[in-house]
Image (cartoon, helix red, strand yellow):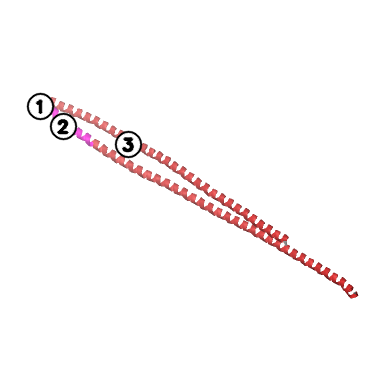
Amino acid sequence: MSGYKRMRRQHQKQLIALENRLKAEMDEHRLRLQKELETQANNTYIELEKLAKRHVAQTDKEMKTVAAEERRIQQQIVAQQKKELTTFLENQKKEYRLCKDKIKEEMNEDPCTAKEEKQERLSRHKETMQRSQAEEEAHLLAQQRLVYDRSCRALKRRSVIRRHEFEQEQLREELNKKRMQKEMEHALMIRQDESTQDLERRQLQMLQKLRVDLMRLQHQTELENQEEYNNRRKRELHRKHTLEKRQQPETSRS
């Protein structure tokens, strides 16, 4: 029976060794899965950082483009209004000279009018013309200022709308990126869970197979030991009976 006990102890050692090996394999498997998750999380962080930096650069470029466009349009408006004002002032000068020449001509045709009266009349006309032209110039400048202010407000509104649309597009891109990363993370976790279940099933099958094999070997050994014991008992009984038969005649002869 000492051999049988040694076999039982050896079988127990085999089971413990397999369990330890499978535990180490499972620990290594779980560590590898954890590293996969950490790697994906790190990649996700890096990608989102890159996206954020790209959005900052895009926003800065977009704002510079919008500001440059605003300045260009404002400069165009100012240049156009300056041109209009120059033309307006030139026309005023022409009109003033024409009116002045006409008045002089009319006064020259009237020799009865005294020189002082002619000079006074010319001065009044000059003052009236200058006042009228100043009012017209002020009106034109006011209209130009109104047009310029309205244009600037329209540009600002368009810039705000454009920036809002731009930010919305960036937000959609960021949300889509995060959604895709969540889906990838979910798919990875499902795949890891399946691989863990497969490993657990395989390890369980290995343990069950070893237990069955050891039980079969143990049972076979028990049968062999029992058979050996039975054969030994038979031999002992046979020797005993033989010895008894040999001893019977000697007893009867005595």
Residue at which label 3 appears: 74
Q: Which residue is mark 2?
A: 128
Q: Is residue 138 shown in magenta?
A: yes
Where 23 sits versus 242, above or below? Answer: above
Counting from the top left corner in percent of width and height, residue 3 is at 73, 60
- Mark-to-mark CA distance, 1 and 2: 16 Å
Q: Which residue extends farthest right?
A: 253
Residue 185: percent from left, percent from top: 51, 51
In magenta stretch: residue 119: yes
Residue drawn at (36%, 45%), measured in percent from left and top?
A: 161
Distance of label 2 from label 3 (alpha carbons):
35 Å
Which residue is depicted at the point 35% across and 42% down?
159
Task: Check disc 1 and report the residue beneath it.
Answer: 117
Question: Residue 89 is drawn in which quadrant?
Answer: top left
User: Which of disc 2 and disc 1 is earlier in sequence?
Assistant: 1
Secondary structure mostly seen in the magenta stretch: helix
Residue at 36% across / 38% down in the picture?
A: 67
Q: Which comes sooner in the sequence, label 2 or label 3?
A: 3
Closest to the observer: 30 or 40? 30
Q: What secondary structure is found at the residue carrying circle 3?
A: helix
Q: Is residue 88 visible?
A: yes
Magenta stretch in the rendered image: 118-139
Q: Mark 1 belongs to which amino acid?
A: Glu
How many neighbours does mark 2 have within 10 angstroms: few (below 14), some (14-19), or many (20 or more)?
few
Q: Amino acid at mark 2?
A: Thr
